[in-house]
Amino acid sequence: MLYANPLIVLIGVAGVLGIILALADHFFANYGDCKVKINNDEELTVKGGNTLLAGLLDNKIFLPSACGGRATCGFCKCGVKSGGGAVLPTELPFLSKQEIKQDIRMACQIKVRSDVDITVPEFLLSVQEFKTVVSKIKDLTHDIKAVEMKLTDPTTISFKPGQYVQFQIPGTSEYRAYSVASQPSLHDRVELITRLVPEGVCTTYIHNILEEGDETTLTGPYGEFFLQEDSDKEIVCIAGGSGLAPIKSIVYHMFEKGTDRKITFFFGAREVKDLYFREEFERIDREHENFRYVPAVSSPSASDNWTGETGFVHLLLDKYLDKDTEKEAYLCGPPIMIDSSVDLLYGLGVKEKDVYFDKF
Ligand SMILES: Cc1cc2nc3c(=O)[nH]c(=O)nc-3n(C[C@H](O)[C@H](O)[C@H](O)COP(=O)(O)OP(=O)(O)OC[C@H]3O[C@@H](n4cnc5c(N)ncnc54)[C@H](O)[C@@H]3O)c2cc1C
Ligand code: FES
């Protein structure tokens, strides 16, 4: 005869009870309207039972929410002085002990059940919503597209090269983050570069459904990954896949303004056909002595006749960079590429405070 382990039975019962309570809360609880006080000043009315993130969104307060509220990006942090309830297990991976002490919480995880008192950094209160019309869609590789959107309301945007916007998946209240690939001087439009993620909700929409002429909604600008314009240090840019987007914005902006800072741009791709914008960066390399473009291909096919660098891009840093000059690094692309490059950059004497990255 089989006996059930009492601990497993207890966990099972607790799990079932949790699900029943969550369903009951979802279908039967009515919390009415609740007040959200922001920075001891503005008071908003939100629908009780919704998440704090959604309540703020209804009131045009756009906290960053790159994962669409699924508790995987950790971007939607704000201070919650009262009314937030206990910190949830889903928040813990993203909150340091210090942040928990300071009552920092993740807005997508907090359900508003009573009045809430929160603090939000002032710069996030100026994030705007933009209505746009898709003006151009272009295939860059087999799985990467450039999408240009003309702003219709408001008609201009101001951002720093490297920052990102959030694209609203039409018909939903979900957003995904995309770095702006165009330079800030083109303030009446934004160009995004998106890589198709298999089964990905947003990129499947962008790659298979979105058409020129469609109306879309963006919010932004967001992000602390942007060009440090007041520095004169040599620059190292490292990108892979769609991570080229913010680097393009940075490089185009710098040469448009005129710069004498030395810039080396390493771009990693699998095959030669994945080296998009190659001609543009080769042209900048030819025209500017202080710019060097180093594309590297990890798996060139024989028919590519590739004579350039092969292998993973981070392994080239040692070869191209000297240790004698102070450098600032901007990295964007897959987490594994960034983690490997960051360690090597530290080894080359680049200071931690001078390394900026966005992983995706
Ligand atoms: C600051 C920031 C800037 C970004 N800029 C860009 C950009 O310029 N261009 C761009 O293409 N993307 C960018 N991203 C990633 C983008 O926000 C989305 O995560 C990505 O497009 C996938 O969205 P999706 O809805 O298609 O996939 P989802 O439906 O969200 O995901 C489907 C599945 O794929 C997995 N997944 C999610 N993202 C990836 C990925 N990148 N690679 C492999 N698997 C993944 C998820 O874990 C999930 O299991 C950026 C992300 C951040 C945080
Ligand atoms: S963790 Fe991504 S939106 Fe909250």
Image (cartoon, helix red, strand yellow):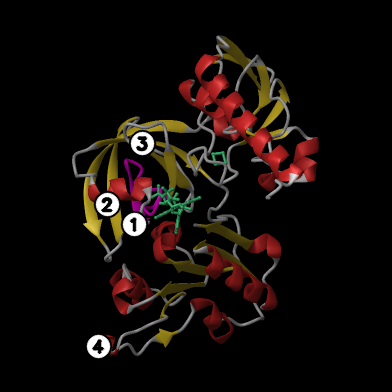
Mark earlier in primary sequence (4, 3): 3
Residues under numbered marks 4 and 3 in contact, where contact means CB atoms less than 8 Å apart: no
Secondary-structure class at tag 3: loop
Disc 3 Cβ-to-ligand 1 distance below 8 Å: no
Q: Amino acid at mark 3?
A: Thr
Secondary-structure class at tag 1: loop
Task: Please tell me in which quadrant of the rendered image residue 197 appears.
Answer: bottom left
Q: Is residue 6 left or right of residue 110?
A: right
Mark 3 → mark 1, Cα distance in angstroms: 28 Å
Q: Position of residue 88 (x, y in %)?
A: 68, 35
Q: Which residue is mark 2?
A: 207
Residues under numbered marks 1 and 2 in contact, where contact means CB atoms less than 8 Å apart: yes
**Residues rendered magenta in the picture:** 179-195
The disc at residue 156 is: 3
Q: Position of residue 99 (x, y in %)?
A: 75, 40
Name the mark nearer the viewer: 3 or 1.
Answer: 1
Q: Which residue is mark 1?
A: 196
Mark earlier in primary sequence (1, 2): 1
Mark 2 → mark 3, Cα distance in angstroms: 25 Å
Residue closer to the observer: 310 or 129: 310
Name the mark nearer the viewer: 4 or 3.
Answer: 4
Mark earlier in primary sequence (1, 4): 1
| Mark 4 surroundings within 10 Å by alpha-carbon count, few (fewer than 14), some (14 through 19), many (20 or more) | few
Q: Is residue 318 left or right of residue 170?
A: right
Mark 1 → mark 4, Cα distance in angstroms: 25 Å
The disc at residue 303 is: 4
Q: Is residue 107 above or below residue 235?
A: above
Mark earlier in primary sequence (2, 4): 2
